[in-house]
Amino acid sequence: MKYLKRAIRSEIEEYLHYFPVLLISGARQVGKSTLALHLGIENYVTLDDINIYEMAKNSPKEFIEHLQKPVIIDEVQRLPELMISLKAYIDKNRLNGQFILTGSASLQSFKDISDSLAGRIGIVELYPLSLKEKYQKTENLIDILNGSLDAYILQKYESNITHDILDGGYPEILKIQSQKAKYLWFSSYIRTYIESDARDLAHIRNLDKFIKMYRLCMIRSGNIFHKNELQREAGLDNRTFDSYFAVMEHTYQIQKLQPFFKNQLKRLIKTPKIYATDTGILCHLLQVDSVEILERSHYKGDIIETFIYDELLKANSAASKKAGLYYYRTTDKKEIDFILNFGQKIIAIEIKASKTVSKSDFKHIYHLQKELPEIFDKGLVFYGGDTFLKLDDRMYAVPFGFLR
């Protein structure tokens, strides 16, 4: 399988011009090392190598000084203390583009140490492959939605993206053909993640309870985050639950989506929703491994909604103008799946699994348009048909295949 160019590549190259340190962070197996190794930098070390790790841990100052630069340091989350020596070296020898770090945890997970690199480090977050990346398209979904959509009206698109949903976006899974091998890969991924990244970050004492909580949170993807209910089902005290959930967030397994809020809007739900960052992992946990099972699944709507969320999240990380991503729900059950907030304008997005769409599917979007006419830009309903439609002024029906 050839190397798939990542959308974030141009942003990475820009960061290298302005910062001594670049961190590429993202989930395990998301393609961080592969991306770093395609930046044309020859020097590479990994803290997965026990000898390198021991050297860096025992003599961090000498380790940093003696590296041939520019250099890639892989799996940096294994030794966050290295950041202190990195800062000391940079303060004496500031030269942009010297260090490219990769890590399967965000800097928030070792915040006290990472704060010392403020002004010295650029951070990019890498997610599983988007459909645009998978099919090597250069357009960015967020940039497209932010512009005029009239040129797409009546264009046809492949309506069936079910296999893309089942596979998710981890690069390795695209190399695997058999269903059994995919099952083994996902099982191995989850086990390795829990036994390595999660255990290292959280100092987990009861692995069984973490595994139970991990599954409980993941399979609620697309739903309101009812912390007390999850905590009770997982059998964890408040402090332990918060610690474990923070690890899931910092290792890019799950994300909270905050509600959209404006002062003039009343009676809004203010609790976040949660989403898995990959539908391949989610489908594996839900034992949904075929088109037929997905079509019959009680979780079908949540899985499709998660897939759209993930596509928006991935595109936003590389967009020329990034959007705030939210959901909208009122206490009287007016709900919109996603809101893209560009500051002076908002785009409302609904998800419908059916192959047809009508103006009634936009009813809550019309309500929001009336509530916030000064900043409402357009409303979209993503649906399972094959034709891009304009149903009303600033209201569009967008096929799932448009994501490709």
Image: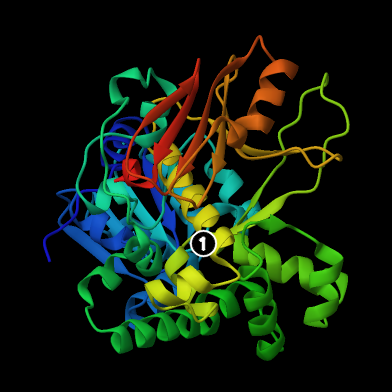
> Residue at the left extreme?
2
Residue type at numbered disc 1? Ala
200 shown above or below 261? below
Residue 345: x, y in percent?
58, 17
Which SS class for mark 1? loop
Whether residue 109 is visible to the viewer of this picture, yes or no, is: yes
Q: Position of residue 307 (x, y in %)?
A: 47, 55
Residue at the limit of the structure toward the top, as seen here: 374
Q: Identify the residue under disc 1.
A: 105
Q: Residue at coordinates 32% horizontally, 25% vertically from top-left?
A: 153
Residue at position x 33%, y 79% from top?
Answer: 49
- Towards the viewer: 338 or 153: 153
**Callout 1: 10 Å neighbours few (<14), some, many (20+)?**
many
Give residue 19's position: percent from left, percent from top: 38, 35
Q: Is residue 256 above or below residue 180?
A: above
State which quadrant residue 260 falls in: top right
Quadrant of the rendered image containing residue 96: top left
Quadrant location, the N terminus: bottom left
Q: Nearer the viewer, residue 387 or 331?
A: 387
Q: Position of residue 353 (x, y in %)?
A: 50, 52
Residue drawn at point x = 72 percent, y = 40 percent: 259
Residue 29 visible: no
Is residue 26 left or right of 337 when viewed as pictured? left
Numbered label tally: 1
Q: Residue at x 68, y 32 (%)?
A: 364
Say left or right for 107 vs 34.
right
